[in-house]
């Protein structure tokens, strides 16, 4: 094998994953929810304003705005994601914030340690990658089942890379 072929072989990812938060309500469901809650707030708000209890009517409008704001923030936070790759020469974690800002962490796979904190009843509480005096958390927004499957796959990838010396 030539030197350039060996370098490209070492750079081939053994493991690659993109982690992102789960959202149970899709865009269509969000629109339906907003239309229904908006209609209810409008009907009751109009009723209370017409009967002279205008402060109650205004609170229905405020409720609707707060509901919309909460879902807007929820969907914005859903844009966060992490890309994790493991090759023979590098463990890379790219974290994308909802704003689009990206932070990248690199670790030497032979010095990398993967720490998983568990609770007996809940499962995995947190996952961290350590190496060369640096650390980063990973998958903090995943649900417990996704954390378990990611931890199992990532540990296996690190073990595979460390065995191929």
Image (cartoon, grey):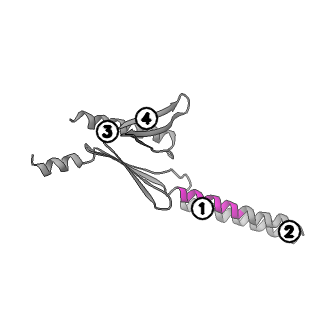
Residue carrying label 1: 72
Above or below, comparing residue 123 to residue 19 in the picture: above
Q: Position of residue 97 (x, y in %)?
A: 48, 57
Report crowding for label 4: few under 14, some 14 to 19, many 20 or more residues within 10 A (C-alpha). Answer: some
**Dot 3 or dot 1, earlier in sequence:** 1
Mark 1 secondary-structure assignment: helix
Mark 1 nearby-residue class (10 Å; few <14, some 14–19, many ≥20) = few
Crowding at mark 2 (Cα within 10 Å: few <14, some 14-19, many 20+): some
Find disc 4 in the rendering and name its residue.
115
3D distance between C-alphas at marks 1 and 2: 27 Å
Residue at position x 54%, y 56% from top? 77
For the residues labelled 4 and 2, the Cα–Cα distance comes to 57 Å
Q: What is the spatial separation of the Cα atoms under label 3 and label 1, in whole angstroms?
A: 37 Å
**Precedes in sequence: disc 4 or disc 2:** 2
Residues drawn in magenta:
64-77
Which residue is tagged 2?
54
Q: Earlier in the sequence, mark 4 or mark 3?
A: 4
Q: Looking at the picture, how far across and down is residue 115, in whole percent? A: 43, 34
Q: Depth-wise, is mark 4 or mark 2 nearer the camera? A: 4
């Amino acid at each position: 094998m030539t030197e350039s072929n060996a370098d490209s072989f070492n750079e081939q990812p053994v493991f690659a994953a993109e982690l992102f938060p789960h959202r149970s309500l899709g865009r269509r469901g969000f629109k339906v929810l907003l239309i229904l809650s908006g209609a209810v707030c409008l009907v009751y708000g109009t009723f209370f304003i017409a009967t002279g209890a205008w402060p109650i009517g205004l609170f229905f409008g405020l409720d609707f705005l707060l509901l919309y704001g909460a879902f807007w923030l929820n969907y914005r936070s859903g844009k966060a994601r992490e890309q994790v790759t493991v090759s023979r020469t590098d463990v890379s974690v790219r974290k994308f914030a909802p704003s689009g800002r990206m932070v990248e962490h690199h670790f030497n796979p032979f010095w990398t340690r993967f720490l998983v904190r568990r609770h007996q009843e809940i499962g995995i509480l947190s996952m961290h990658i350590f190496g060369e005096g640096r650390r980063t958390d990973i998958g903090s927004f995943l649900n417990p089942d996704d954390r378990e499957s990611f931890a199992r796959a990532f540990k296996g990838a690190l073990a595979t890379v460390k065995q191929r010396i």
